[in-house]
Image (spheres, rainbow, N blue to C red):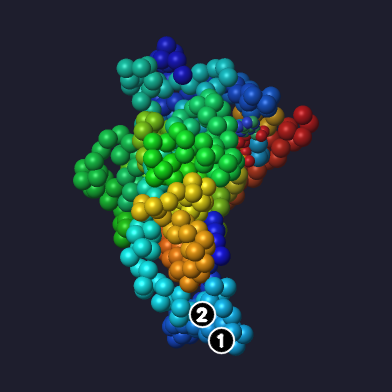
């Protein structure tokens, strides 16, 4: 993450991975020469077989673990005194990752609290975030009193409470049932349209990625790299009509073929 | 009849229960059954002493013990107070010290590598073996007993809290890092709350051990006189063959152990009931 990276002419990008490689201490090459350009306002999905480095890439963008080589550039971010970019990101993990001892309110307050915002000052923003995900009535509940889908909503509210410009989501709905997942996908798209943040979304599901994304990047494993880049040119809002259209089916086939190629490319290595 | 065993299953197991009607009966039975059991045991004891004409200096009848309890109450209560004072002072210092040192150990792995072996040595050395030495070094017998009880009660708090501080959910640690949490914020908002259930297990064990150690150390010290605790009264009764009083002192010790056990379990239940699996009644 060097602040020295020159502003690029492609100033639409919010974050850019430049020749990023990551080798873990046990010798696993998780990423090799990964280039990824996330444009402001797009909904970008990372799709790829298990172990291809999707989570690793997301964590590097979030600043959790440095790349072994290469750089992460934030063309639009302000740099703070220590030279770190103020990335304005929200992160949604695969598990809800809530503090079990804290109420929903306290969990959503956390990102603000860590920045020194008092409880009173945070109240309206927390309430807004909970309203976005339809949980305004549950602010006094403890995580154990919520269903899996509701916990995930709290996790999304927590990621949105800081009003991030970039939302990183690592297979957020993978553990949920089909109906809940569909509902949360629709809600996520609604929030995406309403607030205009950028989303970087990791998934295993071809259908989910085509439904949600404006662009899909397909990765192959060992070493993790990009092998395909597919723009999904269909207007939002994407409702049921889109999910039953020939265009949708066409895109699914296209992405699916690419994923098969990605798995094939992995098997040869 | 040990006063309190280091058991860590204090909260009654959260078993699935049938709906309210039978549940009421069950709750009443939960109180009645142990009491009936106690009455039966005392009756058996009484019957045995009478039927076999056991002399009171071997096994006194229950009513003789009760009589001793009442008549010797001034002496016994004074001794009980001394033992309680040592036990709770040791427990309090063990709790504060255990948590503080656990936090210190969690700060850096090198601090842990340097200090942990000595903590283990303190723990594994039998307290009876080092009590004489402590008696020589400590300014008063009371303070020597306090140190002994503290050494024994301290380790369960330390090791459980250390374990708890290390077991923080990695995803939550990542989340805190992501939002730029300071070391202190991570400690107070994440690591300490996450370690609370572990700490409370340590507390329950330490509560029982503090009492045991206070008694054992007093045996080892062989102290005498006005400022002595229950252990000394037990030895004294034995020398004088005053077995009813010995029994009375023993019963006081047991009752203290049981009270500590329930008190620590209650504290643990109250602190965890909202969120921790161990304290939540399963409803499905
Ligand atoms: N901390 C680590 N130490 C060593 N190797 C690791 C570590 N984390 C990940 N890896 C390895 O790096 C590679 C990429 O892992 P990553 O978790 O990014 O994959 P992924 O694409 O997210 O997979 P999945 O879809 O199963 O979540 C894997 O081969 C994994 O074994
Ligand atoms: Mg992953």
* Residue A37 x, y percent position in the rendering: 49, 26
Q: Are marks 2 and 1 in contact (CB under 8 Å)?
A: yes
In the picture as drawn, the residue positioned furthest to the left comes out as: A120
Q: Quadrant of residue B54?
A: bottom right
- The quadrant of the picture occupied by the C terminus of chain A is top right
Residue at 56% of width from left, 28% of height from top?
Answer: B113
Q: Which residue has dot 1 on it?
A: B50
How far is the residue under mark 2 from the one under mark 1?
8 Å
Q: Are marks 2 and 1 on the same chain?
A: yes
- Which chain letter matches label 1? B
* Residue B114 x, y percent position in the rendering: 54, 26
Tag 1 or tag 2, which sits nearer the N-term? Answer: 1
* Residue B262 x, y percent position in the rendering: 43, 64
Q: Tell which of B102 and B273 is nearer to you.
A: B102
Q: Which residue has dot 2 on it?
A: B61
Residue at 38% of width from left, 64% of height from top?
Answer: B76
Q: In which quarter of the image is residue B81?
A: bottom left
At numbered mark 1, what does the secondary structure look like: helix, strand or loop?
helix
In this rendering, does residue B6 appear at all? yes
Image quarter for ligand 1: top right
């Amino acid at each position: 993450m060097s602040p020295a990276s020159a502003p690029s002419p492609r100033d639409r990008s919010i974050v850019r991975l430049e020749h990023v490689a990551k080798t873990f201490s046990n010798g696993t090459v998780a990423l090799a020469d990964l280039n990824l350009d996330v444009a402001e306002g797009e909904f970008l999905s990372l799709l790829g077989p298990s172990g291809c480095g999707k989570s690793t890439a997301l964590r590097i963008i979030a600043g959790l673990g440095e790349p072994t080589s290469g750089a992460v550039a934030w063309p639009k971010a302000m740099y703070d005194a220590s030279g770190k970019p103020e990335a304005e990101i929200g992160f949604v993990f695969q598990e809800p990752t809530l503090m079990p001892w804290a109420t929903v309110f306290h969990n959503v307050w956390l990102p603000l609290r860590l920045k020194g915002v008092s409880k009173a000052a945070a109240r309206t923003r927390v309430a807004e975030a909970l309203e976005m995900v339809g949980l305004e009535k549950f602010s006094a509940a403890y995580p154990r009193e919520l269903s899996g889908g509701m916990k995930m909503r709290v996790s999304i509210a927590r990621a949105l409470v800081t009003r991030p410009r970039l939302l990183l989501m690592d297979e957020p709905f993978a553990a949920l049932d089909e109906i809940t997942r569909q509902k949360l996908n629709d809600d996520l798209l609604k929030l995406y349209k309403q607030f205009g943040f950028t989303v970087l979304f990791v998934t295993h599901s071809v259908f989910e990625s085509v439904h949600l994304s404006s662009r899909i990047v397909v990765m192959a494993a060992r070493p993790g790299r990009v092998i395909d880049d597919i723009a999904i040119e269909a207007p939002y809002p994407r409702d049921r009509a889109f999910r039953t259209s020939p265009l949708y089916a066409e895109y699914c086939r296209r992405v699916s073929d690419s994923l098969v190629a990605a798995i094939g490319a992995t098997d040869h290595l | 009849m040990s006063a309190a065993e280091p058991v860590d299953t204090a909260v009654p197991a959260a078993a699935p229960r049938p709906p309210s009607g039978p549940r009421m009966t069950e709750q009443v039975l939960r109180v009645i059954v142990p009491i009936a059991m106690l009455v039966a045991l005392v009756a058996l004891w009484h019957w045995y002493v009478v039927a076999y004409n056991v002399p009171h200096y071997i096994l006194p009848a229950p009513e003789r013990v009760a009589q001793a309890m009442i008549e010797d109450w001034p002496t016994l209560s004074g001794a009980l107070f001394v033992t309680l004072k040592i036990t709770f002072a040791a427990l309090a210092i063990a709790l504060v010290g255990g948590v503080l040192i656990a936090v210190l150990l969690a700060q850096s792995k090198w601090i842990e590598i340097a200090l942990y072996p000595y903590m283990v040595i303190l723990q594994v050395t039998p307290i009876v073996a080092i009590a004489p030495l402590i008696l020589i070094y400590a300014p008063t017998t009371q303070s020597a007993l306090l140190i002994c009880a503290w050494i024994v009660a301290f380790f369960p708090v330390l090791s459980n809290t250390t374990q708890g501080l290390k077991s923080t959910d990695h995803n939550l640690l990542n989340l805190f890092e992501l939002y730029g949490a300071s070391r202190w914020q991570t400690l107070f908002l994440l690591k300490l709350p996450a370690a609370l259930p572990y700490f409370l297990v340590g507390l329950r064990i330490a509560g029982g051990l503090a009492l045991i150690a206070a008694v054992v150390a007093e045996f080892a010290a062989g102290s005498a006189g006005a400022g002595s605790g229950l252990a000394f009264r037990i030895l004294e009764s034995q020398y004088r063959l005053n077995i009813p009083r010995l029994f009375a002192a023993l019963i006081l010790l047991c009752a203290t152990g049981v009270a500590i056990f329930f008190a620590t379990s209650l504290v643990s239940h109250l602190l965890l009931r909202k969120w921790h699996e161990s304290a939540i009644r399963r409803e499905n």
